[in-house]
Amino acid sequence: MAKVPKYVYFFGSGKAEGKAEMKNLLGGKGANLAEMVNIGLPVPPGFTITTEVCSAYYQNKQKYPKSLEKEVRTALTKVEKAMGAKFGDAKNPLLVSIRSGARASMPGMMDTILNLGLNDKTVAGLVAKTKNERFVYDSYRRFVQMYGDVVLGLKPVNKDDIDPFEEIIEAKKHAKGVKLDTELTAEDLKELVVKFKAAIKEKTGHDFPEDPLVQMWGAIGAVFSSWMNDRAIAYRKMYDIPESWGTAVNVQTMVFGNMGEDSGTGVAFTRDAATGENYFYGEYLMNAQGEDVVAGTRTPLPISKLKEQDAKLYGQLDKIRKTLEKHYRDMMDVEFTIQQGKLFMLQCRVGKRTAFAAIKIAVDMVGDKFISEKEALTRIEPDQLNQLLRPIFDVKEKDAAVKSGRLLTKGLNAGPGAATGRIVFNAVDAEAWKNRGEKVILTRIETSPEDIKGMDASEGILTARGGMTSHAALVARQMGKVCVAGCDELNIDYAKHMMTVKGKVLKEGDWMSLDGTTGQVIEGKIQTKPSEVLQVLVEKTLDAKDAPVYQTFAKVMQWADKYRTLKIRTNADQPDQAANAIAFGAEGIGLCRTEHMFFGEGKIGPMREMILADTLEQRKAALAKLLPLQRADFAGIFEAMHGKPVTIRTIDPPLHEFVPHEEKEQRALAQAMRISYEKVKERVEGLHEFNPMLGFRGCRLGIIFPEITEMQARAIFEAAADTQKKGIAVEPEVMIPLVGNVKELVHQEKIVRKVAEDVMKEKGVKFKYLVGTMIEIPRGAITADEIAAVAEFFSFGTNDLTQTTLGVSRDDAARFLIPYVEKEMYAKDPFEVLDRGGVGKLMKIAVEKGRAARPGIKLGICGEHGGEPSSIEFCHLIGLNYVSCSPFRVPIARLAAARAALLNSAGPAKKPVKKVNNKVKTSGKK
Ligand code: ADP
Ligand code: MG
Ligand code: MG
């Protein structure tokens, strides 16, 4: 018989059965509680029920494995022994918390219940034991409230409703004329318990269970069930957490922060999670229980105050901070509770942080010799760099706004950056407005895990309550959202969809601006301006030595360049774009689309003449007008690129995209061309195609109208010759699009080479150039060996290759693409993340065949996937030479390429890549 797995792991009394490495089995919280016990930190004893139980529970019609109950009983006895108290005992009751804890942290997504084990009997025992009636009833009312909500399901029904328990509390406070929970007496709290129980019975039909064991199993069941609640599902989708992982359940001895003014609870980061600065950052509340700090019901005190209040305790905590950082070699996020002057650790995990902080901490920890450069690189998600490139407010405009009295209030700078948008007061509206194309600022008294989708839809988040470690702040930082928290001057009325601030009224839909770096909340719109990195690199208006954020960025880039093997190019059609990309570190142009040039000033006219021409003579005459214009464009780009390779694609889109479709414009064109309007109309209609994506486009144009390719090649080579004569090196690469059959390429190549020779002769110079093709239709990939006999390079056009391989028109995919991803038909949007299993396989075939036919062939990618980290990793794995992406993604691509090299350190695969699927790599994630 197979051995029955162990389902329960004890921790406490200086030794734990688990450890940090066991996250898959124990969940993050359980594994780290065990680890803290093992490194000698004060942790209340308890036990962890494994994630395997969760999986078994869902596979087996929500029933537990047989041996679980006995294991739980044994572990509970061990805890009772360690504590010298008994669960359910009327005289000396042990109380526990029931805590969820998945493998990846999902802050606040699932439910926790505190003070479990209280009932009318044990309450009396606890009062006798502690002689503190107020504390006991405070704990009891919290327990009934949490249990009623989480296990028995008494929750607000509508989005504008307030919590039914809060409603009862508010009524009580109102009747007593007090403001804070702490002002309620033991007698008040006792009444609340009775009212809570009655409300539960009335609204849910359930009795509140008095038997502690029933309570415990009810709570355990609720934690497992919460794995499948809407917000947990939404969160998993957002962060790519598989459903199969399941959650663990932790049962842990309660320690009490609500025993009076010598007790308290807090949350801290070992470094500043917003800026990354190396100082102890935390918040605490005296006479409070855990949830109070995070929930934002009271705004907590900064940890520096604890130093004044109790230097010894602070010293102890600070020492733990150092121990943890050294042990985990990372910035940690901790929860602690002080019970009558004694410190207990309740949780630690690697802390979530903003991009600023992630980068700064990684770089600083290399300096501290905690981690290596390589490890630093694997700790920064490439997309996080986006945050460093994002706009900030124009200081002058903001100052003017403040001077003119538009500063509404100031809160905590919980998520740095600048955001301007229209006010909405709930998450549902935020999503709806965003879907209508509006920019919104989600404004809440406090946020809760239910709000995450709405937070994701917002430019920025503003809350009236809660600190730097409140839910809003935590989640905003992780999402990279601007967030200002704890603005207690805001008076928000959810029902009326409005708020007042210092007498000013703001309604839903009004414009507002948040400075998440300073915490300022400003009425109206404010212009934004480029980030520090852009000011140094692109605008050149800031000196690197005055730009600390830039310096950190530069270090990361320097390290990335050291370890990556992929080259990074950019997609740029104009000299200014090329210059930006070079500033960001681009090593060449991977795609210069010539068609954009035709829309430029003075060019669209001759272009249209060319398209509508009746005869070859007319067409050549129009092309002759275009030649000098295109030549000047290419010269500009060659100059900007200073000898770096430039891949230029010959004309690609269907011609109808260039001609006017409105009568008025058609008449104007007819006049300019001195032909009849009817003729223009007829020609335009003649260009109509049912499926232009698969129509008369790409190399097909150059084959039917060779004079177009001829003109373009001439423009390229004349520009190359002229630029070289100026003493600037050039490296043109002419790329023929949409080739599916080598004959197409042979045809075009002949034209290009002939022109190159002519130009060299005419200009009396020699220059190097390449002729190659895009691989963007399946036949091209499959016959890549034949094509490589002619092509000196391939560039994968993965936008079209995805469309043609999947048989999906991108422009028509909107109706089903998102549902497809939701239903997991596609793991990801294939136009965003390369479909490794299909498109990727074709690429691999093309790489192998191409290299076999022409060992020195240059291989790159120019589809939008070239700037997406997972796709870049795939390009690394199949051994491409470079990726090409938009200028602003170049830094992201540099880092992604370095991470691809480091995380797959066996090097680019010569043999078939193992495990080709479309899952995003999760390695290196927190
Ligand atoms: P989450 O995963 O949402 O943070 P937790 O399980 O960490 O939920 O618990 C919520 C709050 O309750 C935290 O502040 C935590 O410190 C506190 N808490 C949990 N268990 C205990 C306990 N045994 N004693 C005292 N406080 C607790
Ligand atoms: Mg917690
Ligand atoms: Mg294409």
Image (tube, grey):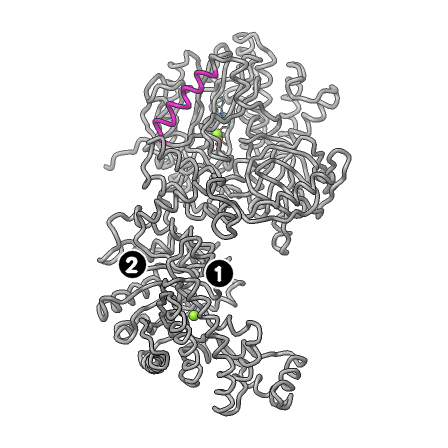
> Per the image, is 328 magenta?
yes
Q: Amino acid at mark 2?
A: Ile
Give coordinates of residue 127: x percent, y percent.
56, 10
The magenta region covers: 314-329
* Residue at image point 26% right, 72% down: 785
The residue wearing badge 2 is 878
Q: Is residue 795 left or right of residue 272?
A: left
Q: Nearer the viewer, residue 131 or 703?
A: 703
Q: Nearer the viewer, residue 804 or 697?
A: 697
Q: Quadrant of residue 333?
A: top left
Instruction: Count residues near mark 1 (Cα–Cα under 10 Å), then give few for <14, some for 14-19, many for 20+.
Output: some
Give coordinates of residue 277: x percent, y percent.
47, 31
Q: Is residue 184 left or right of residue 846?
A: right
Q: Nearer the viewer, residue 737 or 479?
A: 737
Mark 2 residue element: loop
Q: Amino acid at mark 1?
A: Gln
